[in-house]
Image (cartoon, coloured by chain):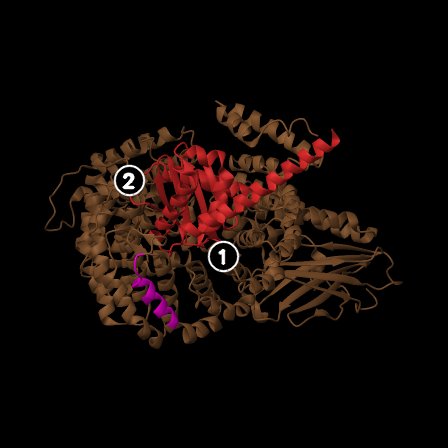
Chain colours: A brown, B red
Amino acid sequence: MNPFSSGTRLRDMIRAIRACKTAAEERAVVRKECAAIRAAISENDQDYRHRNLAKLMFIHMLGYPTHFGQMECLKLIASPGFPEKRIGYLGLMLLLDERQEVLMLVTNSIKQDLSHTNQYIVGLALCALGNICSAEMARDLAPEVERLLQFRDPNIRKKAALCSIRIVKKVPDLAENFINPAAALLKEKHHGVLLTGIQLCTDLCNISAEALEYFRKKCTDGLVKVLKDVANSPYAPEYDVSGITDPFLHIKLLKLLRVLGQGDADASDSMNDILAQVATKTESNKNAGNAILYECVSTIMTIEENGGLRVLAVNILGRFLSSRDNNIRYVALNMLMKAIALDSQAVQRHRATILECVKDSDASIRKRALELVYLLVNESNVKSLTKELIDYLEISDPEFKGDLTAKICSIVEKFSPEKIWYIDQMLKVLPKAGNYVKDEVWHALIVVITNASDLHGYTVRSLYRELQTAGEQETLVRVAVWCIGEYGEILVGNAGMLNQEDPITVTESDAVDVIETAIKRHSLDLATRAMCLMALLKLSSRFPSCSQRINDTIIHYKESLVLELQQRAIEFNSIIEKHQNIRSALVERMPALDEATYSGRRAGSVPAAVSTSQGAPLNLPNGVAKLTAAPLVDLLDLSSDEVSAPSSSGGDFLQDLLGVDLSPASSQPGGNHAQKSGTDVLLDLLSIGTPLAQSTSTADMLSSGHENKSSPHILDKLGSPSGPPSQDSPPVGSSSMMDLLDGFGPVSSVPENNGPTYPSLLAFESSSLRVTFNFSKQPGNLQTTYVEAQFVNKSPNAYSNFVFQAAVPKFLQLHLDPASSNTLPASGNGSITQKLRLKNSQHGKKSLVMRIRIGYKINDKDVLEEGQVSNFPRDL
Amino acid sequence: MIHFVLLISQQGKVRLAKWYSPYSQKERSKVIRELSGMILNRGPKLCKFVEWRGYKVVYRRYAGLYFCMCINHEDNELEILDIIHHFVVILDRYFGNVCELDLIFNFHKAYYILDEILIAGELQESNKKTVERLIDAQDLLVETAKEEANSISKLIAQATN
């Protein structure tokens, strides 16, 4: 017997672990225990197996790896005694989950235990199955579970019902087998069976329309009666929860009734009375009662309309909302979101209370309330609500400011009645929470400002004022600096005064001052400071008197260690000093930006825009340095169209190159991919036998190598300023790299490459899939055949995780390139192509032959198709 | 559906963790870390719901222990509060004035009890007495088996002496 394993009892081990003062000590104890357990496992020690597993479970709970104990669970489950099985099943559920292959090994033991004469062992098996079974196990064991739904002991029936839920969720096809037995459970008296049976029916309804129809017809009245009985039942101590008999059963019943009543007037009608009774009679001074009321309100609002009931429901929510219990207020806000779709007037009545909840000290409640307020906003109340929210912005918690700012900006943008109001609100938000404003929001603001020509003066003056006090708010600085650069002379000249405005006196040097202050602020990020330089350049033309001073500042930045600033400074300095004649033309005021184009572009690229706005402040559009009108458009739309539609113009090509070469780290997946195809070219080179072919492909190789090498070179010349790679470059990078290599790589696969032509071949066809092969050969290299396989989906379901595999006899050499995609759209709407290269060492004697296997997933189910292709043209 | 049940001590130690949806070992420790950070810092007066990764975590504190259950967004949070209490009352009756140490040294018993209350993330039994009866019956089976084993080994020992 192992000297260690018998040494410590479970209790002693736990004590030893608890006595540890440091994490290192604990690790040492655990390591020692694990070593002893491993030793016991390898000796196949039986006496202490259950104790060792119990120890392992504890160790597992502490977060240490315990995979080596998985087989021990299976052994314990397979042993005959109840104590061993009990601990074995517990270990199985704790140490494994449905994704581990080891689990399959236990299927047989569970199957035997499901038919065991000891009902507690049956219970253990059902519990394990219900908690962790995989789809395959569900399929294998469904008949046993179905049988157990009629077992004599109700405690087994209830376990079987919950186990069935897991089974039908894993394998929805099996749902219909469970409809009848589930309906039978609804007639039982035992609360456990009823509870689980109702839940099973609810889940079946969600999975299968047939089940829903069946239960709706056959069971609605019965369920209404059960609810009536339980709602009117006298005090029952064992089911009592603070004065209510079995609230859990109430809730489950209400849930199922909701599913049955939704979209069916008759069913809804038959439950109206009991819903009204539950809504009016349930005590609401304890959590249990409120839980029932909450569920009841949800049901009333989901089933077909009944005016009286709805009023009742909204009143309950109103009562909840004014409760002092935060839990109740939270659920009220949650449910009001649902109610707003049905009766927004009723919800509007509670607007003031909801607004108070936005200012609550509880983050969960604030979040719910803010979502709700957002839904409450309409044209008539937008002004007052926005005012409240902006006022609150000042004093809100820092961690809430982000959410709040985003919602305010969204409301302001969506409902703004006029431009001046929009600009005013943004001018209030920026100084308070400028650091939380997303890029696309201030981009949009600038677009609006450029279009409101009568407000330029007002806007730039207000920004100037705010900048004095809130210079640390990043986006405020950006917008202000941009506007001062553009509209500097309006600021100084006090042009376009509005009536309500207080006049201010700003001299030219004041205007330059604020920008210089901003550029010196080290807390501001690079993009902002680069914008400052740009603004200075613009001002140097607008304010000739300050031109010299500005030039001095710019010269100062020629020595900046930040490459971007240094380069701008050098460029701007040479404009000021050497190109006086074109300067004023270069820095002319921007034309009004097209709002429609901008919002359209934004709508089209929202996800990308979101991703660039986070954590990529260095995402500098180098376009600004180019001093053309287009760059600002770039500036405003960082996720430019190239992502979706690679265009072929020279500029884009360069940008693509930039994307590739500057982002070696961030373009990993694509990059590796590209790399692989790069080596493929090389492999190509090596595997080709005849000298003639070799020379041609060497040329290819060389040219592609040259091309690749030259790209960084081009960049050097360009001296691209665009700091670290932008986030949206990986897709660009990888795709363009692929293009690049496709172009240079297996040139011979291009059909017009004047090789002999062959008819395409229907290589494989099943009811769901069609595979065609197109062939080409390089002249002079008869042994090698290039095959382009095309896969078309004939079924109405899309395939995912599509993988094509092929095998060939020894006289052939096969090389597979990566497929064009791994998802195959339904019904032939698109295809996957994949290139193969076959080298036939017995060319002329034997013809090609291939065995293929295709795997894919339909709705998360794995499908495998296999076939042999032997009808290749003879001369390949 | 309940996706997982966690029992976390005030010091952030896990006392029970039951997963009804698949989470890898790595994800599990991440979830525990994230949630204990969020929940243990909440004040006592705040509501007992935390929104997390599109789910809701409902928790309830008993002495130094936080009982947490993760549910879907549309599930009934108040019901979960009662389910947690249901579990705690049964633990309390079983151990007799349950405390954290009971749950540490008899953690497997806590799991056995939970398995009689929840399966597949759904409530199994609302009758506390039924749960106790089932647990007692199974404990008894274990005791009997132990005694039998002991008496057999005694017999063998006697016979060999």
Question: On the image, numbered disc 2 is attached to which residue?
Answer: A477
Q: Which residue is located at x 21 percent, y 61 percent?
A: A315
Mark 2 belongs to chain: A
**Residue A516 visible (yes or no):** yes
| Element carrying mark 2 | helix
Is A151 situated above or below A486?
below
Q: Is residue B97 magenta?
A: no
| Element carrying mark 1 | helix
Front residue of this view, candidates A854 and A733: A854
Query: Where on the picture, by quarter, is residue A532?
Result: top left
Left or right: residue A397 versus residue A701 is left
Rate crowding at label 2 as few (under 14), some (14 to 19) or many (20 or more) other CA atoms within 10 Å: many
Q: Which residue is located at x 64 percent, y 51 percent?
A: A106
Query: Where on the picture, by quarter, is residue A138?
Result: bottom right
- Mark 1: which amino acid? Asn
Mark 1 belongs to chain: A
Residue A409 x, y percent position in the rendering: 28, 51
Disc on res. A155: 1
Front residue of this view, candidates A545 and B8: B8
Magenta region's main secondary structure? helix
Q: Which residue is located at x 31 percent, y 44 percent?
A: A402
**Residue A614 visible (yes or no):** no
Residue A277 x, y percent position in the rendering: 26, 66
Give the Cα separation between the discs numbered 2 and 1: 68 Å
Which residue range is magenta in the image?
A222-235
Q: Quadrant of the C terminus of chain A?
A: bottom right
Q: Nearer the viewer, mark 2 or mark 1?
A: 1
Front residue of this view, candidates A549 and A181: A181
Assess whether mark 1 and mark 2 are in contact (beta carbons under 8 angstroms).
no
Front residue of this view, candidates A828 and A845: A828
